[in-house]
Image (spheres, rainbow, N blue to C red):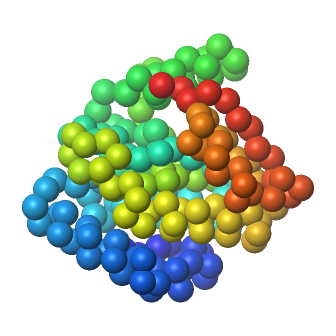
């Protein structure tokens, strides 16, 4: 697991902590016995597509899509050619209603990530067809550290917290430095 270099400045020590070593060992075993999404090289895609110095917005999801070919390391996003999941369809409906911008059925949000939207799931991997299967294995501790690092090292970041799970993360964010927008989950 390798982070993009601007993230490494803040999080490289975190990757060496005991809980992350346990998580890496867990993932090695999972990948030997099961199909795990996203592919190993895409687990940190959100960091590679949105370098720390370009970050403007955080869109927090819970865990990756668990259907075949759906997850590619960006929350709410699916690779080109994959059917758009219901949550993302609802996001696009809201964008169209509010801004009159049509999506044309493309569920790949890579362009958003490249423009500074960190599409971060709280859990970065999942076993095929088993939603939540990698929760409480260490990912949440790591992504909580990501959120608190953004909060302490950046200013004026917009955090989009949709649903109760994401809204519980607001305690990690300095509200005097950042903007928090909360709403129901788009599912």
Number of labels in the image equals 0
Q: Is residue 119 above or below residue 91?
A: below
Q: In percent of the image, x 26 and y 76: which residue is there?
A: 25
Q: Which image quarter is the N terminus in? A: bottom left
Instruction: Give the image location of residue 157, x and y in percent.
Output: 76, 53
Q: Quadrant of residue 124?
A: bottom left
Q: In percent of the image, x 65 and y 13: which residue is there?
A: 97
Q: Is residue 118 above or below residue 7?
A: above
Q: Quadrant of residue 70?
A: top left
Q: Quadrant of residue 150?
A: bottom right
Instruction: Give the image location of residue 161, x and y in percent.
Output: 64, 41
Determine if residue 14 is in view: yes
Q: In percent of the image, x 51 and y 66: which residue is there?
A: 141
Instruction: Give the image location of residue 18, x and y in percent.
Output: 42, 83
Q: In percent of the image, x 80 and y 47: which residue is there?
A: 179
Left or right: 162 as drawn, with respect to 23 = right
146 and 26: which is toward the camera: 26
Q: Which residue reaches farthest front?
A: 136
Q: Is residue 114 above or below residue 40?
A: above
Determine if residue 124 is in view: no
Q: Is residue 159 above or below residue 154?
A: above
Q: Which residue reaches farthest right?
A: 176
Left or right: 90 as drawn, with respect to 64 = right
Instruction: Give the image location of residue 74, x and y in percent.
Output: 45, 49
80 and 128: which is toward the camera: 128
58 and 173: which is toward the camera: 173
Left or right: 133 as drawn, with respect to 149 = left
């Amino acid at each position: 697991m390798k982070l993009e270099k601007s993230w490494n400045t803040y999080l490289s020590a975190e990757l060496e902590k005991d809980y992350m070593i346990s998580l890496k060992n867990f993932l090695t075993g999972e990948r030997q016995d099961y199909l795990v999404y996203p592919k190993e090289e895409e687990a940190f895609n959100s960091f590679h597509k949105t370098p720390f110095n370009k970050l403007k917005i955080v869109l927090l999801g819970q865990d990756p899509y668990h259907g075949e070919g759906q997850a590619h390391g960006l929350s709410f996003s699916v690779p080109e050619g994959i059917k758009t999941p219901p949550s993302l369809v609802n996001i696009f409906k809201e964008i169209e209603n509010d801004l009159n911008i049509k999506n044309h059925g493309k569920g790949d949000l890579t362009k958003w990530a490249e423009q500074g939207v960190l599409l971060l799931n709280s859990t970065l991997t999942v076993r095929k067809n088993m939603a939540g299967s990698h929760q409480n294995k260490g990912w949440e501790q790591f992504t909580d550290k990501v959120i608190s690092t953004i909060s302490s090292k950046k200013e004026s970041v917009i955090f989009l917290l949709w649903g109760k799970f994401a809204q519980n993360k607001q305690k990690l964010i300095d509200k005097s430095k950042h903007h928090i927008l909360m709403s129901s989950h788009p599912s």
